[in-house]
Image (cartoon, grey):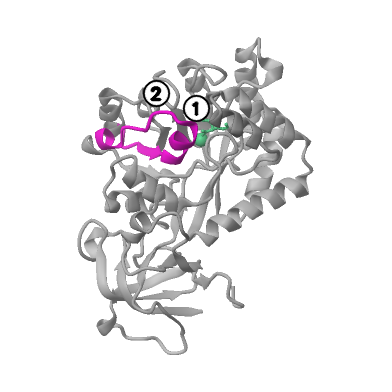
Amino acid sequence: MTLIVRNIGRLVTCSPALGEGPLGVIVGGALVAEGERITWVGRERELVAPAGADELDARGRAVLPGLVECHTHLLFAGDRSEEFARRLRGDSYEPGGIHTTVRATREAAEAELFRLAEERLSRCREFGVTTVEVKTGYGLDAASEARLLDLILRLPGTVPTLLAAHIVPAEFESDPEGYVDLVCREIIPEAKGRAAFCDAWCEAGGGFTVEQCRRVLQTGRLAGLRLKLHAEQLSHLGGAALAAELGATSADHLEHATAEDARALSRSGTVAVLMPGASMMTRTPYAPARLLAEHGVPIALSTDCNPGTSYSENLQLAVALGCALLGLAPEEALLGVTANAARAVGLEARKGRLEPGWDCDLVVLDGRSEVDLAYHYGVNLAAQVVSGGRLLGSSSS
Ligand code: NIG
Ligand code: FE
């Protein structure tokens, strides 16, 4: 199947070499895909249209790469709206709330968990998100973590991350090392060849120490998984330095990161995944995005979609918040949900750009400029979404 997208006011390739500025914008652009892959992008007046192609008329609007959501905890059951309401009345966010979700997720039937995740993923797609990283982490025993990983592997368009070291489960409260042993001896070996990434939460008050995270991540790496780390979210513990030391693909959160952390992450080429929505909804400090950017750390943005700190599937909103609350320029924020987010999930050679050879995942924006994602905020600007060369929501998809 061949697809031609015509009449694109601004084709935002996110490949600087292909057009103007840091986003590689082609004004008056067109795009051709054969099957799942892009085969041509350029100015429409230079297009040699292949015969028999399906055509999509962008009607002068902007076209962007399908958005990449690089950090979610969307596979869970249960409801924590009461906990959220208590916070709005004055309580502060406590990692312990995760236990509520663990209980509900362990108890939930497989079909119910799958339905909940599918519903959330389809909401992501409506916002123009065509790739979604999904973490385990609400199982916290060998069987439950394996079950969550099985479910993620059945969800199309996802990148599976093992987050068995999310929090110390209640039954190991007095023996966190015992749980780290279980993670390293049983849960990670089970995930070998199945999860793409190994992640951990480096945090006091229920999370894991730097030494425990080092053990988990080194074991993950030996099992062939790439590395991510929840670092410096609620306090400064040394997770960012650890992520840099281990050459992790991404260090996530970083609200309490320092200039020294920024230098280390820049040297290791680790992507900083920032989630302004989580800070906003927990009324905690924002990540030092400008400091990270000034040190040359690649920045990605995410919703952090999870039931505790940030329950939203709207990655477009993360772009607006990245600009308004973290001080990013619109082009920085946009690269944060496209090319840099693809790099954060190890898919930089397939996703996050509109370039020949990349997957044909794209969004026709309900707006003339990509800046609208930050400017016209809080609404859904995805007019049409193409994933793997197919228009979603049409009869041919
Ligand atoms: O990314 N940092 C750790 N985990 C989540 C919160 C999970 C929850 O509260 O359920 C986060 O913010
Ligand atoms: Fe998270």
- In this view of the protein, which residue sits in the foreground, 45 or 93? 93
Instruction: Give the secondary structure at mark 1.
Output: helix
Mark number displayed over residue 217: 1
Residue 307 seen anywhere in this rendered image of the structure: yes
272 within the magenta span: yes
Q: Which residues are magenta?
A: 268-292
**Crowd around label 2: few <14 · some 14–19 · many ≥20 (10 Å):** many
Ligand 1 contact, mark 2 (Cβ < 8 Å)? no
17 within the magenta span: no
For the residue marked with disc 1, what is the amino acid? Leu
Residue 275 seen anywhere in this rendered image of the structure: no
Instruction: Give the secondary structure at mark 2.
Output: helix
| Residue 100, x across and y down, in percent | 68, 29
Total marks in image? 2
For the residue marked with disc 2, what is the amino acid? Leu
- In this view of the protein, which residue sits in the foreground, 231 or 2? 231
